[in-house]
Every structure is written in structure tokens, then in C-alpha cells.
Image (cartoon, rainbow, N blue to C red):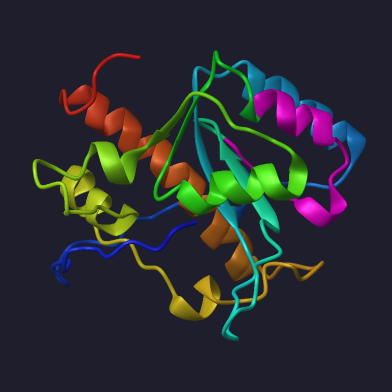
């Protein structure tokens, strides 16, 4: 996910609750992949994001994405790229013209998906661009959007952001962080639509 600057968030705002572990499925088997594929293909809009192991050395090239996150209204599916049980299913969802994929700062995500997996996502809406306001130079991230639409404060740990997303065994904090990145995009999309900030799809 591209990192975008956020406006300062009032510390007195209540915390954004986010998703629970019970709402997240780390897809590891063919059966889970089939469930995810059916659920995602039935949706009109899904939240979308990816995570990649950070690069720190000058000139180092990212080998991401290492994790793909897709969210419906009730469930977030996490796909570890190194252990995909159904690449074609993931490709079918992301390349579907019928499903809108909403996310924040998706430029590098799209390029990496094409480079590493040969997936070219279609019908993608980058909320950081369409909701940034009248100033072309202004950018908007998930934290600013959560404050604007929900009057809540979203916490994003830098330690988790820069953690090893290529690790075969993700921590609980990584799972929740990644799931929230996708789920919040869908929730912001719905909220923005409800107040007329986004046109009907």
C-alpha cells in the first residue's frame, strides 16, 4: 500500500474499533479459497489492499506483494502470495469488471500485482485520489477518512506497518492490521456514497 500523509487527527476522538479476528479468514486451503472466491464474486464492492515486506537498503527492489487483503461487508480474506491455494480464483476476483475494488493509495499495489502474479486488477477506485478534495496536491489516507466520515481515530502502528509481511506465520497484530486496511476502505466507500461524496457506480 502506498503511504500517504494524513491530516492531524484530534486525540479526543473515540478509537475506530476495526474488525475482530472472528471476521478474518487467512486463506490456506482449497476449500477456504473456494469459499472466499464465491463470497467475493457475489459482492458488488469489496475493500482492497496489499502488504509488502519493506525495503530499507538503497536500490533494494521490493519482492511484494506478500499479502493480498479483500473485504466484503462481513468478512475479510487474507491471501499470502507465497502460499496461494487458488491463484486463478484471486485473479478472477481482482480482474472482474463487475466488482468495484476500493482502497487507499493503490498505485504500487497494482504495479506489484501485475509484476509478480500477472494480475491486472480492473474496476479499481483509489479513495485517496477521489476523496482528496479540490486541491490536486492534497492527499487523503485512511486515518483522515475515518475521522471525516466516522468521527473516530484510527490507530496504525508503524512497527506493524514495517514488519515482515513475507513471514510464513503472521502475528495476530499483523492479521488485524492488514484486515483493517481492506475493511476500512469498504466502509469509507459506503459512507462517502451515503453523503454524496461519490457518484453511484
Residue 175 image position (x, y, % from top left): 62, 60
If the image is split into quadrants, where does the C terminus sit?
top left
Residue at 26% from the left image edge and 61% from the top image edge: 153
The relative height of residue 129 versus residue 45 in the rendered view (above or below) is below
The relative height of residue 201 versus residue 116 in the rendered view (above or below) is above
Residue closest to the eye, 21 or 52: 52
Residue 142 image position (x, y, % from top left): 33, 53
Residue 119 image position (x, y, % from top left): 69, 36
Which of the 4 quarters of the picture holds residue 200? top left
Relative horizontal placement of residue 56, taking residue 153 as reference (left or right): right
Residue closest to the eye, 105 or 157: 105
Is residue 85 part of the magenta span, yes or no? yes
The residue sitting at the front extreme is 59
Residue closest to the eye, 56 or 197: 56
The relative height of residue 1 versus residue 172 in the rendered view (above or below) is above
Residue 36 makes an appearance in the image? no
Residue 98 makes an appearance in the image? yes
The residue sitting at the left extreme is 134
Residue at 32% from the left image edge and 29% from the top image edge: 190
Relative horizontal placement of residue 37, taking residue 185 as reference (left or right): right
Is residue 78 part of the magenta span, yes or no? yes
Which of the 4 quarters of the picture holds residue 38? top right
Relative horizontal placement of residue 183, taking residue 149 as reference (left or right): right
Residue at 38% from the left image edge and 55% from the top image edge: 17
Residue at 72% from the left image edge and 23% from the top image edge: 92
In the image, which residues are magenta?
75-93
Residue 176 image position (x, y, % from top left): 56, 59
Figure disc tally: 0
Amino acid at each position: 500500500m502506498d503511504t500517504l500523509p494524513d491530516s492531524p487527527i484530534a486525540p479526543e476522538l473515540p478509537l475506530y474499533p476495526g474488525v475482530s479476528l472472528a471476521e478474518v479468514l487467512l486463506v490456506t486451503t482449497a476449500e477456504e479459497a473456494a469459499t472466499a472466491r464465491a463470497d467475493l464474486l457475489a459482492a458488488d464492492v469489496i475493500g482492497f489492499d496489499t502488504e509488502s515486506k519493506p525495503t530499507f537498503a538503497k536500490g533494494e527492489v521490493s519482492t511484494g506483494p506478500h499479502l493480498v487483503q479483500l473485504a466484503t461487508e462481513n468478512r475479510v480474506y487474507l491471501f499470502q502470495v507465497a502460499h496461494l491455494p487458488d491463484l486463478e480464483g484471486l485473479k478472477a476476483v481482482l480482474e472482474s469488471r463487475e466488482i468495484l475494488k476500493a482502497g487507499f493509495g493503490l498505485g504500487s499495489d497494482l504495479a506489484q500485482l501485475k509484476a509478480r502474479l500477472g494480475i491486472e486488477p480492473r474496476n479499481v477506485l483509489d479513495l485517496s485520489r477521489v476523496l482528496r478534495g479540490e486541491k490536486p496536491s492534497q492527499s487523503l489516507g485512511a486515518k483522515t477518512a475515518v475521522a471525516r466520515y466516522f468521527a473516530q481515530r484510527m490507530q496504525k502502528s508503524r512497527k506493524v506497518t514495517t514488519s515482515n509481511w513475507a513471514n510464513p506465520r503472521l502475528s495476530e497484530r499483523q492479521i488485524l492490521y492488514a484486515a483493517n486496511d481492506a475493511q476500512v476502505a469498504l466502509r469509507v466507500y459506503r459512507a462517502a456514497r451515503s453523503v454524496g461524496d461519490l457518484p453511484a457506480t
